[in-house]
Amino acid sequence: MFGFLFFILFTPGVSEFLCTSSDLELSYTFCDSTAHTFKFHLTPCSMDKSVWKAALTWIPRSDITFLKIVFNVWYEGAKALHWKEVLCSGSDDEYSVCGTLKGETFATAFDIKGSRIQFPKGNYNIILQGFSDDSDNNILMCLNFTMIVKQDTF
């Protein structure tokens, strides 16, 4: 029940199985063709918890002076969520990733509060993109997660 999720992403285009439990399966691949150095750890691997503990380590391929995150979720093939936010603008940035230099190791730990969303049983595709400009032209990283929720959580 208290499984964990841990992965290091180096190879583009290769799908990796991340974790499985009685109620959840997760896997990922990169969206782009460039290799990355990226590590993510999540506990527990279960939809049964309201808070997950996460740790992230990343070595970016360019300086992080501007960072916009775009998060898209599809449920059973239909777009369910589109969210974007500028995390780093170059001045008065509140996130610790802002100002990380190319080749520098960025490491952080944080909570993910899953109780905000009830995920119905089914297949989810989650695309997480990071851009170094506001026009969505210069991609820093793109991850494609597959999440299978095996049973309804409500």
Image (tube, rainbow, N blue to C red):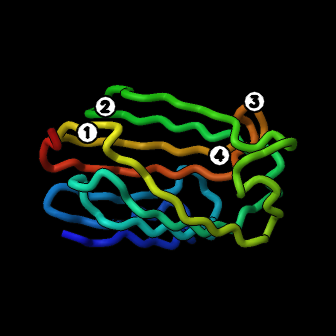
Q: Name the residue under label 3.
A: 135
Callout 4: helix, strand or loop? strand
Q: What residue type is labelled 4?
A: Gly
Q: Mark 1 and mark 2 in contact? Answer it, CB < 8 Å.
A: no
Tell me, for residue 119, which label it has, or none.
1
- Asked whether 122 or 42 is in front, the reply is 42
On the image, the x and y values in percent for residue 24 come to 22, 56
- Of discs 1 and 3, which sits in the foreground? 1
The alpha-carbon separation of the residues under discs 3 and 2 comes to: 26 Å
The residue that disc 4 covers is 130
Taking the spot 58% from the left edge, 37% from the top edge, the residue there is: 70
Q: Nearer the viewer, residue 93 or 139?
A: 93
Give the quarter of the figure containing the C terminus.
top left
Badge 1 amino acid: Phe
- How far apart in space, not on screen, are marks 1 and 3 (Cα)? 31 Å
Whole-angstrom CA distance, mark 1 to mark 4, is 24 Å
Mark positioned earlier in the residue sequence (1 or 4): 1
